[in-house]
Image (spheres, rainbow, N blue to C red):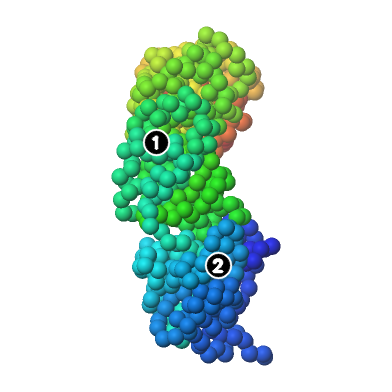
Amino acid sequence: MQQIKGTDKKYFTNCKQWYHRKICGKPTVISYECCPGYEKIPGEKGCPAALPLVNIFNTLGVVGAITTQMYSERANLKEEIEGPGSFTFFAPSNEAWAALPTEILDALVSNVNIELLNALHYHMVNRRLTSEELKHGSSFPSMYQDFHVHIHHYPNGIVTVNCARLIKPDQHATNGIVHVVDRVITAVSNNVQTLIDVDDDLETLRTAIAAAGLTALLESEGQYTIFAPTNEAFEKIPQETLNRILGDPVALKDLLNYHILKHMQCAESIVSGTPMETLQGTMLEVGCDGDQMTLNGRAIITRRDQLGTNGVIHYINELLIPDSAKTLLELAEGSSVATATKLFVDAGLSSHLTGSEPLTLLAPLDDAFKGSMTMTPDMRRLMTNHILKEQLSSKSLYHGQELETLGGLKLRVFVYRNNLCIENACIAAHDKIGRYATMFTVDKVLTPPMGTVMDVLKADDRFSLLVGAIQTAGMTELLNQQGALTFFAPTNDAFSAIPQAELNKLMRNRQELSNVLRYHLAEGMVVSGGVGSHTRPKTLQGEKLELGMVSVQKPVAEADLMATNGVVHAINTIVKPLRGFLGTMSTKADQF
């Protein structure tokens, strides 16, 4: 047995179902009890003594279901369950009876010959059914007007009848079998749509279901789980957002389907967080925290296990809005891109983020922003270039693809073994696909190319000595022409670190200088996000550079200076080939 610490709640378990010694996040204690029908013998291991079988009425006493036994006698059921037959009795525990609302219990016991007898008969099936025979999704006619009891046998071993958990199954009797359950069950006669129709607290949901054309679905045969938002849940949503969704049949249907699971999940079957597929197609994490059932980690379920003939309803006090019903702005507000979101709004781009244009938003993570976030014309232009003119999926991007921004720029796609990047910004999370547009979360702020590699170097004072060396080596045209190069560009500090006599000698030898510079130039575009643990691009000098893991530190002073024909990474040391200038040296450009 696995018992939650500090409670009387126990679960039959085995080593495969110990749930990491926790149930609903709470620590448990493993103990051992005799299997049904056996008892211990002093001085012997285990429970070797088989108990004699008795009839169902007496078995109720043996298993501790004293209240059920008492009510069976009071309702004149004793004779029936002592006599001949083969019955299955789902017997409520003493605690289950005590948990019934006083008015319901009073109504039952004040009319023992009809109401109480009917209630007890509903807990009985006129045949012997072991827990192994209680198959998932099956139902059996009860002994109360043949109203069915509904069985669910979950992969984690938990068995429920009308969502009541079997806490002591398979207690054999001479005339049947007893399963002790953790609640009193009631007859089910209405489908889930009818349950929604008659509950005033679900009036807004009822209207939304009708508007989305889902009424017939919830009246049909099936095994659904509905997380039903109450009127209060709808009222918590900003009116503008709610009106937009209610007025959009596609978004409304997605929203409602996001609250419906394809299978029936009783609350007692949940012992840990589990992703479950909704009718909308995405996943909800259904879990628990202590005695609270949770959705996506939040305890928003206010009422559980309202059972219908075709499913179960759990009431929730917050509306779940799937990404597919959201605008770009709503997608961004629900992600870890608060800085970018504010800048998009400050840049006057809200109409694009809340409208119905098919766009793709490139939203940098908060820690991608450095320095001042003041809105200037340049910042406005930069944020505009983080919005692409079409709705894309990252799965459809390919190497060399060009993407046009709202600002009119063309951005390039780079596909690496370990990353997918748009210019210097690599995708850092799964796509968020909204109603009309998609959001890519990226790890850096875009630095769109502003000229050739030579233009980038000339525009940066740190490279003045390098520019002179390039001109001396006759490589200016190479760095201006079309292509795709990666330049590990030595800064002035790198040149200054070479003894003056050796530097002078190098600058006078045009061929040697060209070799050294070509050793810093790699074929193809390698942005920092595309560097793995042992990336080895081939240099124009012929040998390979070995690049380390991606972290901007020595000798790379600044990564990802983007150019139209390549990318520049500033380094503060000159990387030397194994042969040639200055003898035998290391070939590693250690780490980005």
Q: Position of residue 95 (x, y in %)?
A: 60, 66
Residue found 62% across the figure and 86% down from its top: 40
Disc 2 residue crowd, few under 14, some 14–19, many 20+, Cα 10 Å: some
Q: Quadrant of the C terminus?
A: top right
Q: Can residue 382 be spotted in the picture?
A: no
Q: Position of residue 318 (x, y in %)?
A: 52, 39
- Vertical relation: 30 (above or below) 187: below
Residue found 57% across the figure and 75% down from its top: 70
- Vertical relation: 231 (above or below) 459: below
Query: Which quadrant of the figure has residue 213?
Result: top left
Q: Classify residue 174 as left or right of residue 98.
A: left
Query: Which quadrant of the figure has residue 541?
Result: top left
- The kind of residue tagged 1 is Thr
Q: Position of residue 464 (x, y in %)?
A: 56, 13
Q: Quadrant of the N terminus?
A: bottom right
Tag 1 residue: 207
Element at badge 2? helix
